[in-house]
Amino acid sequence: MLLRSPPRRLHLLRPHHLRVLSNAAAALATPPLAPTDWTEAPVSTVRAATPDASLFHVSLDLSSHPSLLASHLAAGQFLPFRLPSAPYPIFLAISSPPPATSAALRSFEFLVKRLPGTPSARLCDLRPGDLVRVGGSVVGRGFEVGRISDAREVLVFATGSGISPIRSLIESGFGENENIDVSLFYGARNLQRMAYQERFDDWESRGIKIVPVLSRPDDQWTGQRGYVQNAFSRTKKVVNPSSMGAILCGHKQMSEEITRALVSDGMSIDKILTNF
């Protein structure tokens, strides 16, 4: 399912100082613990991930770092980066699935928000072959999907670059169980800022129902409008909270409002997962 509409002008937001980039989750207030060991890895891919170039695909060749590859055990984990002239490390959620799901995986992929004047922008300006300094192992626990292993219905909510670790989750096989009904509410400003549209058909073939939600669509858009939390309130109700789970990644306000709504409908807070 490839969605299309005319391009819109890029609008950029300034990040909060010393906060984790929202590639992992916009709600993060403090980063995971930085590693004590650092190494260098070459960039293998840098290219725009959205038509307006507000998000970039960046990948690292880790064929010479088997221990780093092996440390990625769960979707939603982070890799620390230390870039030249940056006063602090940045932590990016890995968008590719854990290598254990495919013996052919020899790289980490990321969805990076390009914010001028920030370390993330420097990362997007690199070229294949450039070396970057990264942590010797991934950090964070990722999505603890074992907590919702008995769920028969899972609601997934992502906004902006928060879709990055959700891609890792989906492509690691989550949702392929025929006994689970998985719906993904994915919000962006417009189609020009919505990453991974080219992967929607594959995700749907894996059993994921995708509900795109645009906050500022053009006049031709016939899908859900507004914010993810509003679209959810219009289209979905928690019928049997004891058999449901939820996964959230994205803007803080979305995460807070969705969590309140789910809890008020009877879902246990332990069944609502984040990756931080």
Image (spheres, helix red, strand yellow):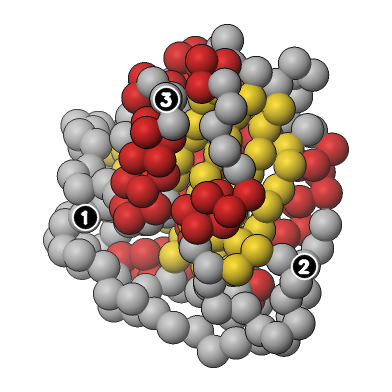
Residue at 53 percent across and 68 percent down: it is: 226
Residue at 39 percent across and 79 percent down: it is: 12
Instruction: Between label 2 and label 1, give the one nearer the viewer.
Output: 2
Q: Residues within 10 Å of mark 3 (few under 14, many from 20)?
A: some
Drawn side of residue 138 relative to residue 163, left or right? left
Q: In the rendering, at what x and y percent does residue 142 appear?
A: 42, 28
Q: Is residue 70 above or below residue 87?
A: above
Q: In the rendering, at what x and y percent does residue 102 appear?
A: 70, 25
Residue at the spot of label 1: 19
Amino acid at the residue labelled 1: Arg
Drawn side of residue 94 relative to residue 217, left or right? left
Cα–Cα gap, marks 3 and 2: 35 Å
Q: Is residue 36 above or below residue 57?
A: above
Residue at the spot of label 2: 3
Q: In the rendering, at what x and y percent does residue 262 appear?
A: 43, 35
Question: What is the secondary structure assignment of the residue under circle 1?
Answer: loop
